[in-house]
Image: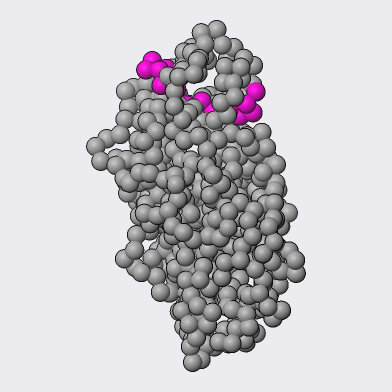
């Protein structure tokens, strides 16, 4: 059948929302040809999924679109915190947290930060970025069937505009087709978890007077707790466009049709505490919060990502962020296998690494909903009882105890109790400001299109030369950088105070062919410098090694392996590490 396919493409992405578009962007950055099909006619028109956490923004920074996202998010740039109050009339209520990053402490850990950008504003940025890289994005196109064999997948796609059908032959299929994923169901993959948690009706509305009621309270979200009209209010532009989430109880027989325009107007007025508030309903959509994780993330050459793989309570915006990070994890592995410098076994580590992260994160999301008393959420016994407190360790500090890592402790928890980014294998590599030819860049800006080996300058232990030979002889995408204060360093310490982070550079080096919820107080002591501070911390100490050691970082910025010191034969050692890591043995 596949001999007669109309199109041949390395990767077929099913679903064109946040996760599918991110997958397209990341694959495009890595030079992987792909086709994306989305059954809807365009990007999201509803302002939802607005909280992009610091790890997601790091990925978008690597992908070169961070400035565009900040431009799209400009209207809400000054909104911070979550307010909980009986009504907005008067000054009652309390801030569950008032600042996303109190004191600017996040700058120790990352070159970027949280960004409040609604899905309807973010998706067009992702779409434009993906298309600029050659992504073939087809809206109003729907996957109908697919069959896989040992060499690939043959899919039938229908153009919903013309009702024409065509076949696509692909090496791999990525299903980012939502919580009711037809692909997951076709594969027979089950789900585990508590299931449905609560349901809301989300109404967009216009009100010119509400801004005066809100005043200078620039919140991300406000939980309104009137027993007869509770709900969540979210600003769209802080002026006249707003979103209100009203509790919906289908388990009690309540239908969506009962949420008439008049009912929603009454509900919003009472919740806000202004009986004559001008409220013009402009849109309505229902959604259900759930906690479920797929029992496996892959079947043969088909992979699940985003909501098709996991559903989470919306409090903290964990779901979309986890999905985007799924896409980034899978993208570099697909690129490595398709380019021939990794074996197919590397793809098995996608499930090994990402599924435990979803299990831990979804439990934390439910716990966050309990903490915040999310409107409409009356948790069943045992649901949402997970560990509470700050979330920076969840969004930035999660680890891969098993997978494409060597030297990680397989018994360590996926989410540590405190944020400890100290170069441990399986953890996100530390952030440190450096300079190359006068340009300021973060260590995180080094990671995207290749493996990266960090060593000392002048690197008398021989790691740099070993990496050069392996990259040239074996065809592995491997860059190597010597870090230090001397003239023989590829990267020097940033000893000059700076006003703020610059955009990511794309430094040179040795390469092979083709080369929102807010955090609590973070624990740990890794990172270097405060906001805009110079960073002269020794790179080796920061990464948990010595001047004679080396650190190997994956394209997604996670530490793959490290050596604490010199070895008799660095080339043989490094080659063995790469063979194990990339499953090429």
Q: Position of residue 522 (x, y in %)?
A: 45, 50
Q: Residue at x 54, y 30 (%)?
A: 219
Q: Identify the image quadrant of the N terminus.
A: bottom right
Q: Position of residue 347 (x, y in %)?
A: 48, 67
Tally the marks.
Answer: 0
Which of the 4 quarters of the picture holds residue 465? bottom right
Which of the 4 quarters of the picture holds residue 536? bottom right
Q: Coloured how?
A: one colour
Q: Residue at x 48, y 82 (%)?
A: 565
Q: Position of residue 404 (x, y in %)?
A: 45, 70
- In the rendered image of this protein, does residue 583 appear above or below residue 197? below
State the residue in front, 540 or 226: 540
State the residue in front, 460 or 284: 460
State the residue in front, 84 or 578: 84
- In the rendered image of this protein, does residue 405 appear above or below residue 211? below
The answer, for residue 115, to whether it is visible in the render is yes
Q: Residue at x 49, y 61 (%)?
A: 526
Q: Is residue 4 left or right of residue 245?
A: right
The answer to if 354 sits in the magenta stretch is: no
- In the rendered image of this protein, does residue 180 appear above or below residue 374? below
């Amino acid at each position: 059948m596949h001999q007669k396919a109309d199109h041949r493409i390395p990767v077929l992405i099913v679903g064109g929302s946040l996760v599918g578009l991110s997958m397209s962007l990341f694959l495009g950055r890595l030079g992987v040809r792909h086709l994306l099909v989305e059954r809807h006619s365009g990007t999201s028109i509803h302002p939802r999924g607005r909280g992009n956490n610091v790890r997601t923004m790091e990925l978008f920074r690597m992908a070169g679109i961070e400035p565009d996202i900040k431009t799209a998010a400009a209207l809400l740039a000054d909104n911070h915190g979550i307010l909980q109050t009986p009504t907005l009339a008067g000054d009652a209520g309390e801030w569950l947290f008032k600042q996303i990053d109190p004191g600017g402490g996040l700058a120790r850990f990352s070159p970027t930060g949280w960004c409040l950008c609604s899905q309807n504003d973010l998706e067009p940025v992702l779409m434009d970025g993906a298309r600029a890289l050659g992504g073939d994005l087809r809206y109003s196109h729907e996957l109908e069937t697919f069959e896989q064999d040992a060499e690939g997948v043959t899919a039938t796609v229908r153009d919903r505009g013309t009702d024409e059908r065509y076949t696509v032959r692909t090496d791999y299929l990525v299903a980012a087709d939502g919580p009711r994923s037809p692909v997951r169901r076709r594969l027979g993959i089950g789900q585990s978890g508590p299931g449905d948690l609560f349901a809301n009706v989300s109404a967009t509305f216009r009100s010119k007077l509400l801004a005066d009621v809100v005043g200078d309270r620039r919140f991300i979200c406000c939980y309104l707790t009137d027993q007869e009209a509770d709900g969540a209010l979210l600003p769209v532009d802080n002026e006249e466009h707003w979103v209100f989430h009203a509790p919906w109880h289908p388990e009690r027989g309540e239908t969506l049709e009962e949420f008439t325009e008049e009912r929603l107007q009454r509900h919003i007025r009472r919740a806000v505490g202004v009986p004559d508030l001008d409220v013009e309903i402009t849109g309505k959509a229902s959604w259900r919060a759930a906690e479920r994780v797929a029992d496996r993330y892959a079947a043969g050459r088909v992979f699940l990502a985003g909501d098709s793989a996991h559903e989470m309570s919306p409090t903290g915006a964990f779901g979309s962020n986890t999905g985007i990070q799924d896409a980034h994890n899978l993208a570099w592995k697909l690129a490595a296998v398709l380019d021939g410098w990794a074996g197919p076994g590397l793809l098995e580590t996608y499930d090994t690494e990402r599924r435990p992260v979803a299990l831990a994160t979804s439990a934390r999301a439910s716990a966050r909903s309990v903490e915040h008393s999310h409107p409409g959420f009356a948790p069943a016994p045992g649901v949402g009882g997970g560990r509470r407190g700050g979330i920076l360790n969840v969004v930035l500090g999660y680890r891969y105890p098993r997978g494409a890592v060597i030297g990680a402790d397989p018994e360590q928890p996926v989410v540590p109790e405190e944020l400890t980014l100290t170069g441990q294998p399986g953890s996100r590599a530390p952030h440190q400001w450096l300079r190359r030819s006068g340009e300021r860049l973060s260590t995180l800006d080094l990671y995207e299109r290749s493996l990266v080996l960090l060593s000392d300058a002048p690197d008398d232990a021989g790691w740099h030369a070993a990496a050069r030979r392996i990259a040239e002889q074996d065809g592995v995408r491997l860059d190597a950088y010597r870090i230090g204060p001397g003239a023989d360093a590829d990267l020097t310490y940033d000893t000059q105070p700076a006003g703020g982070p610059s955009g990511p550079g794309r430094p040179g080096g040795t390469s092979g062919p083709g080369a929102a919820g807010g955090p609590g107080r973070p624990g740990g002591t890794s990172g270097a410098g405060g906001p805009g501070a110079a960073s002269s911390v020794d790179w080796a100490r920061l990464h948990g090694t010595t001047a004679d050691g080396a650190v190997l970082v994956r394209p997604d910025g996670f530490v793959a392996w490290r050596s604490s010191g010199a070895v008799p034969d660095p080339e043989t050692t490094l080659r063995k590490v790469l063979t194990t890591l990339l499953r090429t043995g």
